[in-house]
Image (cartoon, rainbow, N blue to C red):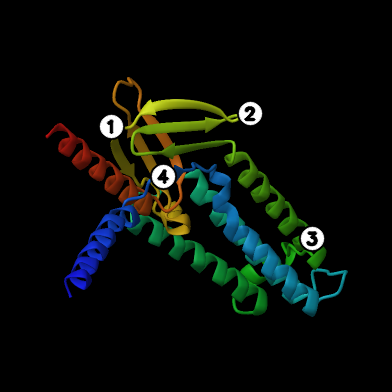
Amino acid sequence: MADATEGEVVKGKSDISKAPSKETPQCIYLVPYPKVVFLYPSFITALVISVILTFTSGATVGPDDTVAVICSVVFLGVVAINMVVLAFDFPRGTSLTLFFFIAALALGLTVLFILKPNLLPAVGNWLKEVRPVANATFFYVISALFALLFALVLIVVRFDYWEVRPNELLHHHGILSDLKRFSAPNLRIDKEINDVFEYLLLRSGRLILHPSGERRAIILDNVPFISHKEEQLTRMLGALQVQMRQDDH
C-alpha cells in the first residue's frame, strides 16, 4: 500500500515537472516578411477566375464575352484595392471599413452597368468603350507568377530570421547562415499594429525588441501571428525572470 502511494507521489512530481516545458516554449522563431505577401488575395482571385473562364469561355475572348469582361473587371478591382491597401496604412478599423465600402460599391456598380447598360445610358456607353478582357491563359500565367514570387519569398526568409531562446537572441542571416548573438535576459518587447488590413490578412504587425546593452532597437516588420508570438515571448521571458530570481535566492 505504501509502495503504491509512493508511486503515485513520484508520478505526480514527474507530471508537474513536465508541465512548464509544455507551457513555456524553449525556442521561438520570428520571421519578418516583405509586404508582397499581402498580395495573396490577388493571387487567389486570379486562380479562381482562371478556373471559371476555363469552363465558360474559349481560348479566344472578346469585348462581347460578358463573363470574361466581368471577370477581368473584378480582377482589376481586387488588384487596385490590394495595391492601395499596401501603399497606405489604415491604423483604424473605421477608415478601412469606409474604404472597403466605397471600393465594393464602385466595383458593384461597374459590374451592374456592364450587365445592364441601359440603366444609365451615359455610363453604359462609356463602359462599352472600356471593356477590359482577358482569357483563362492570361490568368493562369498571372497565378503562376504570383506563386513563383511567393515561393521565392519563402526561400529568402529562410536565410534571414530571428530565434529567441531563454538566454539569448540569435539573428540568422546570409546564405552561409551567419549568426549574431544578443543577450536575452532583460529583453523588452513592444508590439505595434499600424495597419488593420495587414493584421486581418496574416495577423501580422511590428515587433520591437530592446536587448540589454544595445543602443538601437531591433525592428521586425510584418511578423505573422504577432499576438501569438508576443504571448509566447512574454511567457518565456516571464519564466526566465522567475528562474533567475529563484537562482538568486
Amino acid type indicated by mark 3: Phe
**The disc label shown at residue 138, or none:** 3
In the figure, 33 relative to 113: above or below? Answer: above
Could you tell me the amino acid type at mark 1?
Pro
Earlier-in-chain disc, 2 versus 3:
3
User: Marks 4 and 2, Cα distance to the nearest angstrom?
Assistant: 21 Å
Q: Position of residue 92 (x, y in %)?
A: 33, 53
Can you say which quadrant of the picture contains the N terminus? bottom left
What secondary structure is found at the residue carrying circle 3?
A: helix
Q: Spatial distance from mark 1 to mark 3, Cα to Cα?
A: 53 Å
* Residue receiving disc 1: 185
Q: Which label was assigned to residue 176? A: 2
The first of marks 4 and 2 along the sequence is 4
Classed neighbour count for the residue bearing mark 1: other residues with Cα under 10 Å, few (<14), some (14–19), many (≥20):
some
Lower sequence index among marks 4 and 1: 4
Q: Quadrant of residue 52?
A: bottom right
Disc 3 crowd rating (10 Å Cα; few below 14, some 14-19, many 20+) is some
